[in-house]
Amino acid sequence: MSLKNDILAALEARRGQAVSGQELSARFGVSRNAVWKAVAALKQDGHDIDAATRRGYCLRAESDVLTAEGIRAALPPALRDMDIRVLPETGSTNNEAKRLIAGGISGYTLVAAEKQTAGKGRLGRSFFSPEGSIYMSLAFRTDAEIADAVKLTTAASVAVVKTVEALTDCRPGIKWVNDVYLDGKKICGILTEGVTDIESGRVRHIVIGIGLNCGKEPFPEELRDIAGSIDRAGVSRSRFIAGIAAELIACIEGADFLEFYRSRSLVLGKEINYIQNGVATPATALAITDSGALHVRRADGTEAVLNTGEISVRLR
């Protein structure tokens, strides 16, 4: 790691507090002038750092350059050794994560990007990805049945909602399966992809991609009535990404999340239409099962359990 990155990590660990040049000099075994040059380079990169004689250097709380050091500093200590990759630009963080899987990964790998040029949605759809929003993918090795892997897409929506509620005054809801809404508009898209073993039919790796709208770039006209954003209120994207990753890993490792998921559901008890193979069927959403499926009662009184896949739900 370069001196610049070492100093950034030290400032991130005490974001909003002053760290003296003498302390940094002693810690990294370099001159005060070398510290000053490294800080100057960080400021050139866009980091908002205050410098004052006899006080030292302070990375301002609202500084928002996305870095691995910033994400790592905001993670719980037990997760700070994970592989974190931050890219200035990528086609899709999910595709980048799958490329890393092909090269061999162990443990959790987190990919984040300042900008996506070819964001991916469900069923091959594109995902609008304006600058200033959050684009991240978490990849990990598993040995799951496909049905168990699919359940993790609900966990991702829980991780997003919990983090947004912890860091802002917003209270989003979840539309089955995993779309996160705020004030009637979609603010987050989630795409879970599995890499399977052909012989066993089991999932060997999972990639969970998350795009959370929080930028200021206006949406295209065709999306303005359906897409929304959160106001980060000065909270850095690094903190959001770290929070979402930590909550998601807790779910992956066994934390119960379905009760929270149900408590934030926008469809339970509501009249809906579910669309399957292009056909809309009116129904009432009765329950969310322990596997994450949606239990509904159709207008004719018959009941069904809807699993994820080529099914979408719209409130009536």
Image (tube, rainbow, N blue to C red):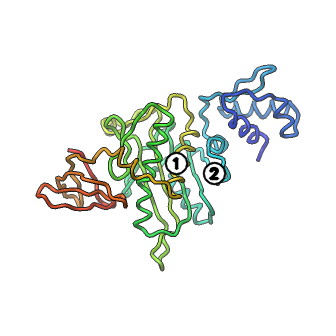
Residue 66's place in the image compared with 279, above or below, is above
How packed mark 2 is, by other alpha carbons closer than 10 Å (few <14, some 14-19, many 20 or more), is: some
| Quadrant showing the C terminus | top left
Q: Which residue is outermost to the top?
A: 53
Q: Nearer the viewer, residue 262 or 225?
A: 262
Q: Can you give x and y, in whole percent of width and height, for residue 134 in the image? A: 50, 42
Per the image, label 1 sits on a secondary structure element best described as helix
Q: Which residue is outermost to the bottom?
A: 199
Q: Can you give x and y, in whole percent of width and height, for residue 25 in the image? A: 85, 34
Amino acid found under the numbered disc labelled 1: Glu
Q: Say left or right for 218 vs 66.
A: left
Q: Residue at x 24, y 59 (%)?
A: 276
Q: Nearer the viewer, residue 241 or 303?
A: 303
Look at mark 1 in the image and give the residue it sits on: 247
Query: Sequence-wise, which precedes: disc 1 or disc 2?
Result: 2
Q: Quadrant of residue 16?
A: top right
Q: Say left or right for 76 vs 128.
A: right
Amino acid found under the numbered disc labelled 2: Leu
Q: Residue at x 64, y 54 (%)?
A: 83
Q: Nearer the viewer, residue 100 or 295?
A: 295
Look at mark 2 in the image and give the residue it sits on: 79
Residue 284's place in the image compared with 239, above or below, is below
Q: Say left or right for 310 vs 106.
A: left
Real-space Cα distance between discs 1 and 2? 11 Å
Counting labels gives: 2
Residue 217's place in the image compared with 157, above or below, is above
Q: Can you give x and y, in whole percent of width and height, for residue 252 in the image? A: 51, 57
Per the image, label 2 sits on a secondary structure element best described as helix
Residue 11's place in the image compared with 141, above or below, is above
Q: Can you give x and y, in whole percent of width and height, for residue 315 in the image? A: 23, 45
Q: Which mark is residue 194?
A: none
How packed mark 1 is, by other alpha carbons closer than 10 Å (few <14, some 14-19, many 20 or more), is: many
